[in-house]
C-alpha cells in the first residue's frame, strides 16, 4: 500500500487544482480530499513549493494528514490495510469488498458517504452516515434499487416515528432517500418509475424557521453595547450572531473559522464550507464594532474591563495621546448613556422605536455632535481592523485552538463550540423574552429581513451562496459585486446606531 499526496489533474472553477491524498492498495485507488486548492505552478512532486505564501502551514497539514492515514491503516504487524476491513460495527453489514451488495439502498447511501468524505465535506458525510444507520436499523438497506416501492417508504416512515425523530429530521431523511433514487435512475440502476412518484407525503410540515425581527436584532445589539465590553462567552455568542446576520447570514462553521487575514482591503473573502462558493463581503462599521474587543490591546486598549471603567488609568499612562480610539470610545459611550437616561424618563408607552424615530430625545444639535463622534470612531475602528488583518492569521473569534489540525479534527472542534454558543443563545433568548433560537437563526434573520430592502431574489440567493440559479451565478461572477455590498449596507443601515434601544 502507498499513501502519497498528489495534485488533482482537473482544475476547479477558479482554475486551481485540489491537493488530494492517493491511497493505493491491491491496485485499488481511493482519494482523500484536503479541501486545499492551489495554482499548478506551486506544486512540485509531493509538496507545495516555498513560493506559495501559505506553503508552511499547508505542507504541515498535508504531512499531518498523511501520517494520520498511515496510522489508521497500519496493523500491529506493521502491514498497511484499510481499517474498514479489519473493524466492523454493528451498523454495517460487510463482505470482503463492500459493506452492501451492489445496487441496493445501502450501497447507494454508502457511496454518498464516501463521496462527501473524499471531497472534505465532513458534515455532509456524517449526516449521510446517520441516515445510512437508520436505513440499516429499519431494514431497507438491503432492498434492491429496482425492487424498492411504497411499502418500503412506509416501513422507513414508521421506524422514524417510533424512534421519535422530529418532523424536520424526517423531512431531511426522506429527501436523502429521494436523492438515492434520483441518482439510481440517472445511472440506470432503476428502470421503473421513481418510488416517490405520486406518493403523498404524510410527514407533518416542520415549524417555520426561527428568525429575529429587526427590532429584536436592535435589542440584542443594545444588550451587547451596554454590557460594557465584557468578553465572556455570552458576549461572544451575541457578537458572532450579529456578525453572521450582517454578513449575508454566514454559517457558524464559517464564522468561527474566519481569520483576520481573511479581511483584505476591508472586504471579507472566504470559501463557504458547505457549498464551496467563494463569498466576498464588505466590512462595515457594524462589523468593526462587533470584533473590536478581539483586537490586541496594543491596538485597542480596553476602556472597560469586565464592566469596570479604566479610562483614568489609560489617561494617566499617557495612552490617550497615542491611541485616539480611547477618547472616541469614551465620548461615544457617554452619548449612549445619556440617550438611555432620557429614554428611561419617558412614559413606557413613548419608548417604542417608531415613537423615538419621530420624537427624538436628543436635539438636532446633539444628534449632529453624536453623529460626528460616531463617524470618527467608526473610521478609527476600521483602520485598526485593517492594521491587524495585515499582521495576524489567528481566528477572529478566539474559540478554536490555533494549532494545526486535520479537517476531521477541525469539524469536531467546530461542532463542540457550536453546541456551547447555542447554549448561550438560549440564555440570551430568555433575557429578550423570546422563544429559544440557535445560531442558524442568524442566517434565517438575514434572509427574512433582507427582503424588506432588496427585492431582487437572484441577488439574495447569490449573497446566501445557494446552489439554485447556479448558471446565472457563474455568469454574474464576471461583474463587480458592488450591488451586493450596497444591498447589505441598506440592510445594515436600517440598524441606525443612534436609535438602537
Image: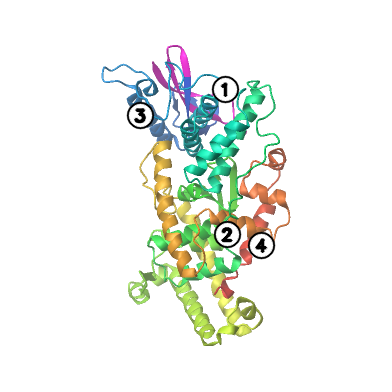
Query: Magenta segment: does it hold 25?
Result: yes
Please report the bounds of the magenta region as a residue range: 1-29
On residue 490, which mark appears?
A: 4
Q: CA distance from mark 2 to mark 1?
A: 42 Å
Q: Which label lies toward us, 3 or 4?
A: 3
Element type at marker 1?
A: loop
Q: Which residue is pictured at 38% across the width and 29% down the height?
A: 90
Q: Which residue is pictured at 51% across the width and 41% down the height?
A: 160
- Asked if residue 311 lies left or right of residue 260, the reply is left
The residue singled out by tag 2 in the image is 211
Answer yes or no: do the residues labelled 3 and 1 have beta carbons within 8 Å? no
The residue singled out by tag 1 in the image is 144
Answer yes or no: do the residues labelled 3 and 4 have beta carbons within 8 Å? no
Dot 3 or dot 1: first in sequence order is 3
Local packing at callout 1 (Cα closer than 10 Å; few below 14, some 14-19, many 20+) is: some
121, 315: nearer the viewer: 121
On residue 68, which mark appears?
A: 3
Measured from the top left, where is residue 305 in percent x and y? 35, 69
Answer yes or no: do the residues labelled 2 and 1 have beta carbons within 8 Å? no
Amino acid at each position: 500500500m502507498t499513501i502519497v499526496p498528489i495534485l488533482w489533474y482537473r482544475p476547479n472553477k477558479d482554475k486551481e487544482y485540489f491537493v488530494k491524498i492517493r491511497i493505493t492498495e491491491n491496485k485499488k485507488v481511493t482519494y482523500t480530499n484536503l479541501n486545499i486548492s492551489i495554482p499548478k505552478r506551486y506544486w512540485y512532486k509531493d509538496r507545495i513549493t516555498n513560493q506559495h505564501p501559505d506553503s508552511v502551514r499547508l505542507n504541515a497539514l498535508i504531512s499531518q494528514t498523511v501520517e494520520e492515514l498511515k496510522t489508521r491503516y497500519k496493523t500491529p504487524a506493521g502491514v498497511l490495510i484499510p481499517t474498514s476491513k479489519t473493524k466492523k460495527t454493528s451498523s454495517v453489514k460487510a463482505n470482503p469488498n463492500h459493506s452492501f451488495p451492489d445496487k441496493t439502498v445501502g450501497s447507494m447511501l454508502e457511496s454518498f458517504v464516501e463521496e462527501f468524505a473524499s471531497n472534505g465535506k465532513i458534515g455532509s458525510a456524517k449526516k449521510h452516515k446517520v441516515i445510512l444507520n437508520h436505513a440499516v436499523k429499519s431494514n431497507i438497506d438491503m432492498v434492491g434499487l429496482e425492487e424498492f416501492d411504497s411499502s418500503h417508504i412506509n416501513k422507513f416512515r414508521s421506524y422514524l416515528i417510533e424512534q421519535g425523530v422530529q418532523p424536520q429530521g424526517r423531512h431531511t431523511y426522506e429527501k436523502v432517500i429521494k436523492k438515492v433514487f434520483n441518482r439510481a435512475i440517472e445511472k440506470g440502476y432503476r428502470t421503473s418509475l421513481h418510488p416517490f412518484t405520486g406518493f403523498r407525503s404524510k410527514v407533518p410540515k416542520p415549524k417555520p424557521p426561527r428568525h429575529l425581527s429587526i427590532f429584536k436584532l436592535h435589542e440584542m445589539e443594545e444588550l451587547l453595547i451596554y454590557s460594557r465590553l465584557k468578553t465572556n462567552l455570552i458576549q461572544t455568542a451575541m457578537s458572532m450572531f450579529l456578525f453572521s446576520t450582517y454578513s449575508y447570514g454566514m454559517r457558524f462553521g464559517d464564522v468561527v473559522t474566519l481569520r483576520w487575514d481573511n479581511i483584505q482591503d476591508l472586504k471579507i473573502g472566504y470559501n463557504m464550507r458547505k457549498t464551496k462558493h467563494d463569498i466576498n463581503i464588505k466590512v462595515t462599521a457594524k462589523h468593526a464594532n462587533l470584533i473590536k474587543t478581539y483586537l490586541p490591546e496594543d491596538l485597542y486598549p480596553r476602556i472597560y474591563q469586565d464592566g469596570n471603567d479604566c479610562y483614568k488609568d489609560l489617561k494617566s499612562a499617557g495612552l490617550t495621546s497615542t491611541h485616539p480610539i480611547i477618547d472616541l470610545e469614551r465620548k461615544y459611550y457617554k452619548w449612549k448613556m445619556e440617550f438611555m437616561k432620557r429614554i428611561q424618563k419617558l412614559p413606557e408607552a413613548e419608548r417604542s422605536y417608531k415613537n423615538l424615530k419621530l420624537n427624538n430625545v436628543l436635539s438636532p444639535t446633539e444628534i449632529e455632535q453624536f453623529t460626528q463622534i460616531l463617524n470618527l470612531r467608526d473610521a478609527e475602528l476600521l483602520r485598526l481592523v485593517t492594521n491587524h488583518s495585515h499582521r495576524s492569521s489567528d481566528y477572529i473569534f478566539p474559540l478554536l485552538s490555533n494549532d494545526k489540525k486535520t479537517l476531521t479534527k477541525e469539524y469536531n472542534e467546530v461542532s463542540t463550540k457550536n453546541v456551547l454558543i447555542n447554549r448561550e443563545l438560549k440564555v440570551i433568548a430568555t433575557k429578550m423574552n423570546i422563544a429559544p433560537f440557535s445560531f442558524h437563526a442568524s442566517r434565517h434573520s438575514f434572509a427574512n429581513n433582507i427582503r424588506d430592502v432588496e427585492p431582487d431574489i437572484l441577488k439574495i440567493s447569490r449573497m446566501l451562496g445557494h446552489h439554485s440559479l447556479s448558471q446565472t451565478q457563474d455568469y454574474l461572477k464576471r461583474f463587480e459585486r458592488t450591488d451586493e455590498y450596497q444591498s447589505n449596507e441598506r440592510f445594515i443601515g436600517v440598524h441606525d446606531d443612534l436609535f438602537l434601544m
